[in-house]
Image: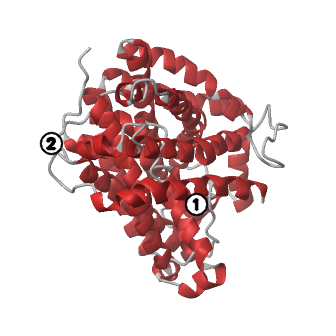
Amino acid sequence: MKREHFSSRLGFILITAACSIGLGNIWRFPYITGKYGGASFVVLYLIFLVILGLPIVVMEFAVGRASQRSTALSLNLLEPKGTKWHWFKYATITGNYLLMMFYTVISGWLLYYFVEMAKGRFQGLTSHEVANVFLNLQGNPTAMILCTAVVIIISFGICSIGLQKGVERVTKVMMTLLFGLLIVLAVRSVTLPNAENGLHYYLYPDFRTMQKIGLSECIFAAMGQAFFTLSIGIGTLSVFGSRIDKSHSLTSNALYMGVLDTVVALLAGLIIFPACFSFGVEPDSGPNLLFITLPNIFNVMNEGRIWGTLFFLFMVFAAISTVIAVIENIITYMMDATGWSRKKSALINFGLLSVLSLPCIFGFNLWSSFQPLGDGSTILDLEDFILSNNLLPLGSLVFLLFCTRRYGWGWDNFYKETLIGKGLPYPKFARKYISYILPIIVLIIFISGYLSLFQ
């Protein structure tokens, strides 16, 4: 079966960016930027994005493009005979499934809020009543199943059409609308009364805050955000590398992806902080920011129903574009592993994910007594911990070792692949850093995930 490729470089860049542009950009990045010193933290973050995250992105791209396969077969084709690198493929598909088991549920929440905001559900509600809307949704498994099902049906429907006609075409439209909505919302937010206080908190370099918190803690927070924002380590980017031609360098493509991811994160902060400070609301992080704090702000804002609807439409585009990208990887993986047609792979995986999303849903209601990571934790927290604190860092370490060690694919083969195509070359002078120091940094990030859990 002939492998389908992207029709344009833009399609490739946008869909790989869609993998990384997600909830972490909106509900985590602005919060930790403000917490750890504003613009000074952003500078640290950008440095670590370039020296920590992007080298591994290029490695995933290279493994995919050199093998022309997903991780179902790529390691089998590139590894030295007799080695067992290909066993890693089971971890990559597990990571993709885990991500979708809770990400489709959260995407369903966003879809629900978009509809309810458009209907005017939040108008006239007190802050306590706004919070209860979210709690009532989580306590209603039927509503959550329906919302999640809509997300899964839409995403698999688009992926089943094909790479160019389905995934690439729809992603281009969604990402264009996403950036358009981001800019409109950011302009509206920065023109609110007292917005300058939020901009000062967000963008002013506050080295005193960094000193108070501790420079090492700020550095580590920047490293962690730079690492996790790119969704590296589970082969999601590798499959898109297998569908791009060799006309442009992988380093240039990775840089474009990182720039788009960072622009979205920065613009999200321009929406959130001016709005919070304008209405005297403490900026929060995580689900509370999206589903409680911001609806309260839109509730008291002039024409807040319109702006709230546009915001949640933006969030739906951000979330579903990620879901489509990861589901495309799952479908391609199964096509490579089994020889199934696209439609058969889509149908079978649609059934699997529909069932696998249920534990996350039930963790908020029917199975809420199961608190795997301590009081107040849910099945979603467990799924996210397994993925974010285990599979992503350890998977990134595998890609690092595979591309730099002679008993893997090896530096020479990897570097040769990065030289193909016009654009930025991969930094050969950084070989020792990438081969020996970067794996230690990834291990430290992995260990820190467990230390934070115990703390």
Sort mark 2 into few (<14), some (14-19) or many (20+) by Cα contacts within 10 Å.
few
Where residue 128 appears, x then y in whole percent? 74, 58
Q: Which residue is mark 2?
A: 247
Q: Amino acid at mark 1?
A: Leu
Q: Residue at x 50, y 57 (%)?
A: 26
Name the image colouring. Answer: secondary structure
The answer for how far apart the CA atoms under marks 1 and 2 are is 44 Å
Labels 1 and 2: the sequence-earlier one: 2
Viewer-closest of 334 and 71: 71
Q: Amino acid at mark 2?
A: Ser
Q: Which residue is mark 1?
A: 294
Residue 181, picture quadrant: bottom left
Q: Determine if residue 333 is in view.
A: yes
Above or below, 129 against 317 in this view is below
Where residue 40 appears, x then y in whole percent? 47, 79
Viewer-closest of 175 and 98: 98
Image-based side of 272 in relation to 14, left or right: right
Where residue 298 appears, x then y in whole percent? 55, 61
Above or below, 224 against 3 in this view is below
Sort mark 1 into few (<14), some (14-19) or many (20+) by Cα contacts within 10 Å.
many
Q: Residue at x 37, y 28 (%)?
A: 74
